[in-house]
Amino acid sequence: MGVLSALAILALLIVVHEAGHFFAAVWQGIRVTSFNVGFGPVVLERRSRGVQFALRAIPFGGYVAFPDDDPESGFDPKDPDLLKNRSVVQRALVISAGVVANLLLALAVLCAQGILVGIPAGFNAGSGVLVVALQPEGAAALAGLEAGDLVVGLGGKSLGAGTNAVQQLVEAVKNSPNQPLALEVNRNGVSTSFKLIPASQSGSGRIGAQLQPDGDEIYRRAHNPLEIWQQAQREFSQILRRTISGFVALATNFGETAPQISGPVKIVEMGAKLAQQGGSSLFLFTALISVNLAVLNSLPLPMLDGGQFLFLLLEGLRGKPLPERLQLAFTQSGLLLLLGLSVVLIVKDTSQLAFVQQLLGR
């Protein structure tokens, strides 16, 4: 059920993104050929007012097609309602609408969280720090830690509870690159000792683990709609800021951050775990992935909205479009890059699934 929930959320995010493009075009009277969820052969389709709505076999992504892309569409190439014949501003609205739709969805989901779950009102802390997730080649995984472990002691002393315990452990890790740390870990009720050696990254220690306080967050009913809106804005701003920081770190320090990239398989696995937790976890997962999808599509890379927006910007500066040969080469190289990256991430993430590692005898 968790996997189905995660897949449903990813499908929703794709539909919302493409719906942004679609409605921005239709609103301006621009001709649209099809609205597609997925790629490859058509599995299900329906036609309405000359537009094909299709579900395709490969579910990772989607697109809105315009007759401009089809030389056999039957439309006059000079038709003023073709996307290519509209102004730069009108085309920019269509291209940017998908990103805007995902950002608005994230904000709406966080508002829904405030209505249905409530406003955070503290933390019912247990004892220690919970290991939520691990990078397979990170220092924590190499030391033998596992997701679900509860770190209760550091250097022979108790960590305590709550966010202070997490901060204490994080600070110890940051200040100890390549230095051993003695951890006391509770795993399924059994106490075990581990020696953890944080890896050095830019002079700071890193262990490749997601940590959180042991316990449950407490929620209360909102006093008024304004409080819900303010809380949603705060969470949205935090997610957007951290997402942008993550992409900047990836661009400026690719060698060290590249192993942290996750593909669709890992995202579904993470979403499935959060779906099983219930509460606010699924809302935050939806908002997080929606913001990540928006920021990713904003990058000036081939096949992404940001790449098309870059073409428009250059066209506006030059006063005429770039040569078609250059645009085609840029797009084709981007397609190969994205397909290759998708295959690599899917293989990597699949090989790290627990049941696959059991089959391989790891």
Image (spheres, grey):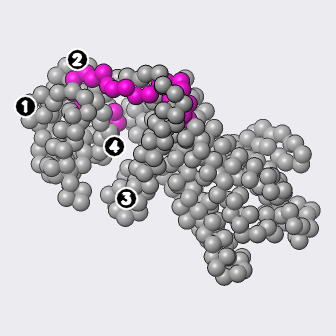
Instruction: Give amino acid for label 3.
Output: Ala
CA gap, disc 1 and disc 4:
26 Å
Percent position of residue 107, x then y? 55, 41
Numbered disc 2: secondary structure:
loop
Comparing labels 2 and 1, the label whose residue is closer to the camera: 1
Foreground: 200 or 142? 200
Comparing labels 3 and 2, the label whose residue is closer to the camera: 3
Which residue does the numbered mark 1 point to in the structure image? 156
Q: Are marks 1 and 4 in contact (CB under 8 Å)?
A: no
Which residue does the numbered mark 2 point to in the structure image? 189
Q: What residue is drawn where x is 18% and y is 44%?
A: 171
Q: Earlier in the sequence, mark 3 or mark 1?
A: 1
Above/below status of 112 relative to 244: above
Q: Residue 135: which disc?
A: 4
Q: Earlier in the sequence, mark 4 or mark 3?
A: 4
**Where are the magenta residues, as a range?**
109-136
